[in-house]
Amino acid sequence: MIECNREGKVPYNISIIIPIFNEEGSIQTLYEEIRDVFTDSGINYEIIAVDDGSRDRTADVLKGIAEKDHRMKLIIFPHNYGQTAALMAGIDYCEGEVVIFMDADLQNNPKDIPRFIQKINEGYDVVCGWRRNRMDPVIRSMFSVIANKIISRVSTVMLHDYGCTLKAYRRFIVKELELYGEMHRFIPIYANWLGARIAEIIVDHRPRLHGQSKYNMWRIVKVILDLITIKFMGSFKTKPIYFFGGSGILCFFLSFLCLIYLVYSKFSLGISMIQSPVLLLSAMLVIVGVQLILMGVIAEMLIRTHFEVLKKKTYVIKEKINF
């Protein structure tokens, strides 16, 4: 029996968030497939469709569905903000205890959703899809394999397919997120920082039937830059002085080695210090070292302001008992 909450509403068990951009040919089919998956399941679900500034009839199709089914929630952006922003909007307004992301192009198969729910019920906090048999061009798949290996190595969260949108999360994970850029693909890394249990399952990947792929080479550059940010945030978010100060001390050490070389060259090889470019390098390293340490101090002040002004905690509580 499904119980009502304090407001008299039946709480949602599942929230499905779908970022959409120019997918008018896919929306109706996707909605019907999701509806069929949950028919007779007893699961109370909502679909949060985020129209990311589509320039075709996507919004009209979504409005038509929403008029007939109250479980279809619709958010419309005035212009294209990107997939991460669309997912973040869905997170802000979702109510389900389990949150599922999926694409709108029909390449993700809604029939896989029950397997994600089953895995969550086994005790996992995050379940990621793995498109082992991808229906994408060979070059794109090859770049994806390389990118996933790099991301796994840098982050130490070993997944085969960071780019697969089809993922499931417990509510407490996604509600802690603030995503920017192309950061949505790195949510499992954020979850790992929170101590989440992460699983990966093989999912069905279907050929694209409608519309055009939003993938381009510029996304690779953005992912690389975001990965650098992720690495920094994961290792030094609460203590940036360790990164900047450590780099500054390294510069001082290299400058000291340069000075030793200059002294050796002067007295053993008869080379004037003034004539050697190493002297200039040594001076530059000292200057850079001082700047890095000062940047570390400023970053420490900023991060403290961030946590104190926004009332942010440096920890996340998964569960409280007898409070």
Image: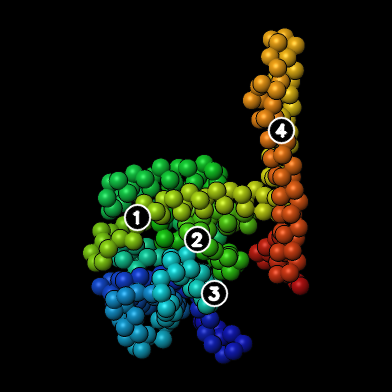
At x 75%, y 17%, the residue is 263
Q: Position of residue 130 (x, y in %)?
A: 40, 52
Identify the secondary structure beneath mark 2: loop
Question: Disc 2 vs disc 1: Cβ atoms closer than 8 Å?
Answer: no
At x 30%, y 66%, the residue is 106
Mark sitting earlier along the chain (2/4): 2
Identify the secondary structure beneath mark 3: helix
Q: Which residue is mark 3?
A: 92
Q: Which residue is mark 1?
A: 216
Question: Disc 3 vs disc 1: Cβ atoms closer than 8 Å?
Answer: no
| In-image side of 115 versus 179 (left or right) | left
At x 50%, y 60%, the residue is 181
In the image, what residue type sits under mark 2? Gly
Residue 177 sits in which quadrant? bottom right
Q: Which residue is mark 2?
A: 181
Q: Say few, some or many: other residues with alpha carbon within 10 Å of mark 1 (under 14 / 14 to 19 / 20 or more).
A: few
Mark sitting earlier along the chain (3/2): 3
Mark sitting earlier along the chain (3/1): 3
Q: Position of residue 310 (x, y in %)?
A: 70, 70
Identify the secondary structure beneath mark 4: helix
Mark sitting earlier along the chain (4/1): 1
